[in-house]
Image (spheres, helix red, strand yellow):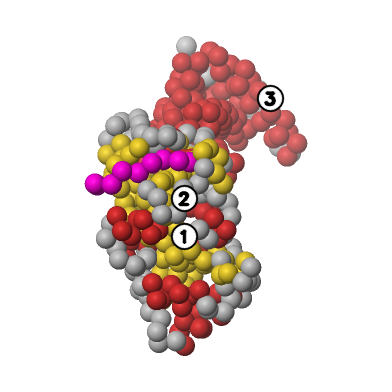
Amino acid sequence: MTLNNWFAQIFIISVMNLRNITQRAGASLVAVFGVACVVSVFVGVLSMATGFQRTMANAGSPDTVIFMRAGATSEMSSGLSYEQTQLVEKLPGIAKDDDRPLSSAELFVVVDLAKKATNSSANVSLRGVQPAAFKVRDKVTIIEGRNFEPGKNELIVGRSSQKQFANLEVGKTIKFGQTEWHIVGVFSAGGGLAESEIWCDAKILQGTYRRGNSYQTIRAKIESPASVAQLQTALAADPRFIVDVKLEADYLAEQSEPLSKFITSIGYPLAILMALGAIFGAINTMYSSVSTRTREIATLRALGFGAFPVAFSTLVESLVLALVGGVIGSVAVYFIFNGYTVSALNFSSFSQVVFDFAVTPALIKQGVLMAIFIGFIGGLFPAYRAANLPVATALREV
């Protein structure tokens, strides 16, 4: 048999099989539904990790560095004295605006707020910043109300935190411990991590939480990418510093890693277990298809159709059903989850990060490839059985 004849036979039998799917609608729909469920769960879970990583990445800037106490793994475990913050501002490589260093010494605490959806308690980041913070973090923009005034118990809340947590509307008064705070504005930060936070004047936060004149981190703009190495050299050469510096983007990538790994460690095993069930469903569906077409297959073989075209056409049917299921699952999860806002505990800071599910083209591609894999494995054994049906015996079946 020539190659052209093989392709012609595969095409003829495949088209015939696909046209007759309606006669096996029940079993075919079960296979499609099973694959759609696998793909939707797989893409849905991973879109959560992707959304979280995107939020953390959007917070980082390639021209911003973060200073922390040497050896500290997060802002929560860092601590800097006022004297160190003053020395850091004078380091070479830090950008200036009107001869003033673009740096902000910051304080970070965790407060309890109620989630809107469940009314359950959640940890939320309350950050004390200096006036220069709004030039260092140039993505931050007041979108409602006004900025807080230094020296007053005033708060501005991130757009995402206002959506997720109760009683954060402009004009309301909220109490943390024994101190009342007035909410005066809402800010956006380009979809980054800061939108999950609440900001206030660093000096007021120091007094409220009895932190003396200490800070935890310093964020600063740098003059050029080479400034990072320049700053690291200067810190290492001066014994007065017990401080590390790194790009903000690198720091946030490290902070996002534990939760991202946790989500993916759940997503992949869950998808694999569901995929196994979908594969068995596909195998059962295709075995049923071969059984109902026993005489048809035998007749085709008797007319001169080869075993390979018969087997390959069965595999094509399985792949088409799986592909339909994969597309349905991907489309469904996109419209249901893409942009859906949730909050999760960031293990590094022990506070909530608000982010949106992100169903990206790359995730949809992974989901469709998984569907194709399920269809291939699910159709392989039934295809082998179809190719090896005894022609004479099959023709006698009623």
User: Is residue 116 or residue 277 the one in the foreground?
Assistant: 116
Q: Foreground residue, 201 or 363?
A: 201
Kindly indicate the quadrant of the structure image that contains residue 68.
bottom left
**Residue 48 image position (x, y, % from top left):** 44, 42
Q: From which residue to which does the magenta span run?
A: 177-185
Left or right of 391 on screen, residue 150: left
User: Residue at 41% across / 46% down in the picture?
Assistant: 154
Q: In the image, what residue type sits under mark 1?
A: Gln
Q: Position of residue 15 (x, y in %)?
A: 66, 23
Q: SS for tag 2?
A: loop
Which residue occupies 46% across, 48% down? Answer: 148
Task: Kindly identify which numbered label has been placed on residue 130.
Answer: 1
Residue that carries the numbered disc 2 in the rendered image: 149
In 3D space, how far apart are the residues under numbered discs 1 and 3 (Cα atoms)?
Answer: 73 Å
Task: Please tell me whether mark 2 or mark 1 is closer to you in this view.
Answer: 2
Residue 304 visible from this viewpoint? no
Q: Is 249 contained in the magenta span?
A: no
Could you say which disc has been placed on residue 12 in the image?
3
Q: Residue at x 63, y 32 (%)?
A: 309
First of labels 2, 1 by sequence position:
1
Foreground label between 3 and 2: 2
What kind of element bears circle 3? helix
Q: Is residue 274 left or right of residue 370?
A: left
Label 3 to label 2: alpha-carbon separation: 77 Å
Q: Amino acid at mark 2?
A: Glu
